[in-house]
Image (cartoon, rainbow, N blue to C red):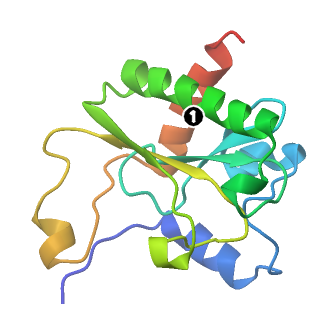
Amino acid sequence: MDRIWAPWRMEYITASSTSDNRCFLCVDSSRDDQALVVGRNNTAFIIMNRFPYTNGHVMVVPIRHVGSIDSLTDEETLDMMRLTKIMVAIFKKEFSVDGLNIGMNLGRAAGAGLEEHCHIHIVPRWFGDTNFMPIFGETRVISEHLHASYERLKRRFLEQSF
């Protein structure tokens, strides 16, 4: 059996096993660093995905716990898109991405892992970022530590002017 060592994931595993069943996307602003919140605006925030598809995978989330896009207010919708636009610029500057996947999974049939709190995924992409590992090994290789990506993205976000 092959092994891939990823000791940083133990923090997530132990945190989820002691969870009190609260929504992991309902993050009080006093816990932003602990929750890996990159930045906020009036009604939404950006948070690192702890199970990233690629380095820097983030989610744009309404602060209000709402499960469907049609239940978002116009202000929430606009704030989420503003943050998405900012992250696109940050990924181009800081990560030199070749492209980005941006989207929402609405409903279990569409792949939503959390149906009760809608969110937008932003997944940075580079030419050659896919290889045989996901196909044959059912494993993704993330080449930068989650906290290192967080620090880079947060620094760039704080440099933005609103």
Q: At x 77% / y 69%, what residue is drawn?
A: 23
Q: Do we see residue 39 in this rendering?
A: no
User: Which residue is outermost to the front?
Assistant: 70
Q: At x 41% / y 23%, what residue is drawn?
A: 94
Please indicate whether residue 124 sits to the left or right of residue 30 in the image.
Answer: left
Q: Residues within 10 Å of mark 1 (few under 14, many from 20)?
A: some
> Dot 1: what SS?
helix
Q: 33 and 134: which one is in front?
A: 134
Please indicate whether residue 116 sits to the left or right of residue 65 in the image.
Answer: left
Q: Quadrant of the N terminus?
A: bottom left
103 versus 41 height, above or below = below
Q: 137 and 125: which one is in front?
A: 125
The x, y position of residue 143, in whole percent, is 31, 49
Q: At x 30% / y 30%, what residue is drawn?
A: 97
Q: 154 and 128: which one is in front?
A: 128
The x, y position of residue 37, in whole percent, is 69, 43
* Residue carrying label 1: 151
Amino acid at dot 1? Glu
The x, y position of residue 121, in whole percent, is 51, 50
46 versus 146 height, above or below = above
Q: At x 70% / y 31%, what residue is drawn?
A: 78
Q: Quadrant of the C terminus?
A: top right
